[in-house]
Amino acid sequence: MVARRLADESVQPAQFAFTAENAKWAEWKIGLYPTGRQQSAVIPLLMRAQDQDGWVSRATIETIADMLGMAYIRVLEVATFYTQFQLQPVGSRAHIQVCGTTPCMLRGAGDLIDICKSKIHPDSHHLNADGTMSWEEVECAGACVNAPMVTIYHDTYEDLTPERFEEIVDAFAAGKGDTIKPGPQIDRLTSAAEGGRTTLLETPSAKRTKFVPPPPPADAAAPAAAAPAPTTASKPKDVSEEAAPALKGTPKSAKVSQAKAEGERKAANASAKANGKPNKAMREDATGAESKAAKVDGGKAPGKKVASEPADGASATSTKKKAQPGITPKADPAEVNPVAEKGGAAPLFKAPKGAPDDLKLISGVGPVLESKLHALGITKWSQVAKFTAADIAKVEDSLSFKGRVARDNWLAQAAALAKGGEAEYIRVFGKKPR
């Protein structure tokens, strides 16, 4: 249950392809994800492929990796991690996964495993005599309350007894699995109590009305409203006394002294900014301002780079950024022109005129990778066929797939397609392009 590996090469098919219907579904599924996040479709695509062929082969993994622009090892990691993916051929009518985690074992999963051994095969992951049934033990299948349970394809069968499980196995072996109702096999609704509801059984006799407190006695005196506490807080700049009654009690003399203090503070700040000296009135121990402050001499502070002033007659608005004394302005991001894969407008290659070729006919290029190649300016088979070593390095660096071009033989494939399309490809390679 821990070591999950691909099936032996003797049973691996040479290639995999989605049916026309499933290929259309896969394209739609990939399109649901944002640009650059299409690899998130790997699990749905693997599951669709398994529903089509019954299991996940090496060719399936490589084809889906190409479709999503992923390294093969990344898709292999997903397929081998989840026990929902079958990595070798399974029964054509049923592959039974018996939950062997503690709750199910305590309630009889061992008996279910014994039935699988006697009716299907003594060993897990082996087909029965006619190849219609197989089984395995798996970790928790997510219905512990209804233990023991098994999973068959997308359905679960819960609350099993040995007798009921034998009936289920016999029905699937006979090709009558559709006659078995999934879910609990006893009188239970999902994971509710066995036998139906046991609480909240009474029927309401009348519609509930909103509670309204009774009025106070007629002779009860109303409580006096508490007077607001006086305050000496200064009035906020944007609050009027009418909007804040608590401010009405502030003495006039306090308002005058507050205004005077505020004026002195502003004057001290203005003085500090004008002469470049620390504001002793604000903080008497302030030091260092004299040496660090910019000199009011046209910005010619020693050791500092100074931005050039605008030419004579140029308006202040003609420059993007106003130069500041003693500061070297940074380059405007709008003036930087990175290559296409970094978000800039200039592609790595100049796209030829005319309609683009179907780059997906090159083995190893899927819809996602084709769109990335288009973004780099690569739209024709002839471009790929003429790639130099430097071109290959640029493409592989920008798309982060070292060795893909040589491994999948892009240049030879593209040369054949550029020379005579699919007919030339078949003549050279003896098979149709993907």
Image: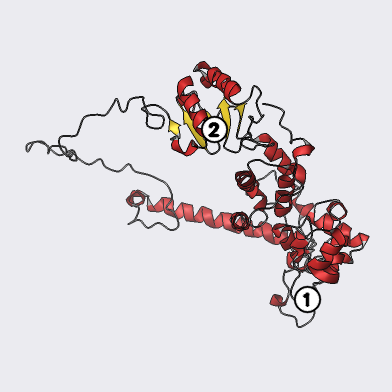
x, y (%) of residue 296? Answer: 77, 64
Residue that protrudes farthest toward the top in the picture? 106
On the question of residue 377 being in view, the answer is: no
Locate residue 397: give its quadrant: bottom right
Q: How many marks?
A: 2
- The circle on residue 334 is none
Using the numbered discs, state the Cα–Cα distance from disc 1 to disc 2 in whole angstroms: 88 Å
x, y (%) of residue 421? Answer: 80, 69
x, y (%) of residue 9? Answer: 79, 38
* Dot 2 crowding, Cα within 10 Å, few <14, some 14–19, many 20+: many
Question: What residue lies at 45% left-to-right and 35% top-to-bottom?
Answer: 182
Closest to the observer: 240 or 187? 187
**Secondary structure type for disc 1:** loop
Residue 183 left/right relative to 212? right
Closest to the observer: 203 or 425? 425
Question: What residue lies at 49% left-to-right and 32% top-to-bottom?
Answer: 171
Question: What residue lies at 76% left-to-right and 69% top-to-bottom?
Answer: 357
Closest to the observer: 270 or 43? 43
- The circle on residue 173 is 2
Residue 181 left/right relative to 349? left
In this rendering, the answer to whether 103 lies above or below 414 is above
In this rendering, the answer to whether 270 lies above or below 172 is below
On the question of residue 130 being in view, the answer is: yes
Q: Are marks 1 and 2 in contact (CB under 8 Å)?
A: no
x, y (%) of residue 147? Answer: 48, 23
- The circle on residue 310 is 1
Q: Quadrant of the C terminus?
A: bottom right
Closest to the observer: 326 or 27? 27
Q: In the rendered structure, which disc, 1 or 2, sits on the residue that comes first in sequence?
A: 2
Residue 196 left/right relative to 350? left
